[in-house]
Amino acid sequence: MKAIKLSHRSVLTLALLAAPALPLAAHADALLDSGVPPSTTGLQLALDGNDYFAAEFNLAAGQTINTVNAYLLAGLDAPGDTFTIALYAGGDLTSRNPTQLYAAQATYTADGWNGLTNLGWTPGAAGLYWVAFEVGASDSAIGLSAPTPATAGTVPAVAYAFNAGSGYQTAGATSFGVQVNPVPLPATAWLALSGVVGLLGLSRRRVAV
């Protein structure tokens, strides 16, 4: 028997070659996370039939949005009232007719994070996008509120927008609690990564062949 010693680089290369190919969108990093507002008594953005608030963020080509949440308070509403979460393309929400790519109805459940999961929204092209929280024709929300500011998150928005009934207005908009997350890593990917760590540990020993 002859003993050989594999370098860390060799073991890592072999492990990566053996691991399954992962799509670009399959990672756990937040796309947008502005954090929890430090107070619920200060300035608040109202979410009703005329007002909207939104946050702009970067998206890589092929990334899939899995969850979207906003930090909301009841205001005039009660659990079970609905609102709409929409995704818009481009960097300009001052237009009266921004390009809406996706929209889905969400339900307010309690003060705190409210939103949608398992969305599967994949715009395709890399670039800037807006996630908006609004009240549509079929929604029942009449006065949800989002306390501001929220600045302690890990991935702040590129910009924030708020409107008071006359189209999206970005001037004077402030941060609110918003989260956008991609599709998480599949279990097989975590298994592959665990294998890489284990192989790196074994590479410290001599391997008999």
Image (spheres, rainbow, N blue to C red):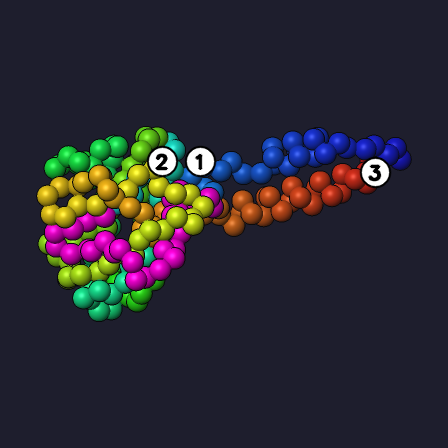
Q: Can residue 184 be seen in this view?
A: yes
Q: What's the amino acid at mark 2?
A: Asn
Quadrant for the C terminus in the image: top right
**Residue 205 in picture, x, y percent from top left:** 81, 40
Q: Quadrant of residue 64?
A: top left
Q: Is residue 33 above or below residue 78?
A: above
Q: Mark 2 points at which residue?
A: 58
The outermost residue toward the right is 1
The outermost residue toward the front is 42
Q: Which residue is drawn at 36% across and 36% down?
A: 59
Q: Is residue 115 visible?
A: no
Helix, strand or loop status at disc 2: strand
Mark number displayed over residue 24: 1
**Residue 35 in picture, x, y percent from top left:** 40, 51
Helix, strand or loop status at disc 3: loop
Q: What's the amino acid at mark 3?
A: Arg
Work out whether mark 2 precedes mark 3 in sequence or the reverse, and give the earlier one.
2
Q: Which of marks 2 and 3 is in front?
A: 2
**Residue 207 in picture, x, y percent from top left:** 81, 38
Magenta highlight range: 28-53
Query: CA–CA distance between discs 1 and 2?
Result: 14 Å
Q: In this view, does 143 lie above or below 62?
A: below
Q: Mark 3 points at which residue?
A: 206
Q: Nearer the viewer, residue 149 or 120?
A: 149
Query: CA–CA distance between discs 2 and 3?
Result: 46 Å
Q: Alpha-carbon neighbours of circle 2 within 10 Å: few (<14), some, or many (≥20)? A: some
Q: Alpha-carbon neighbours of circle 3 within 10 Å: few (<14), some, or many (≥20)? A: few
Q: Is residue 161 magenta?
A: no
Specify whether 144 is left or right of 40: left
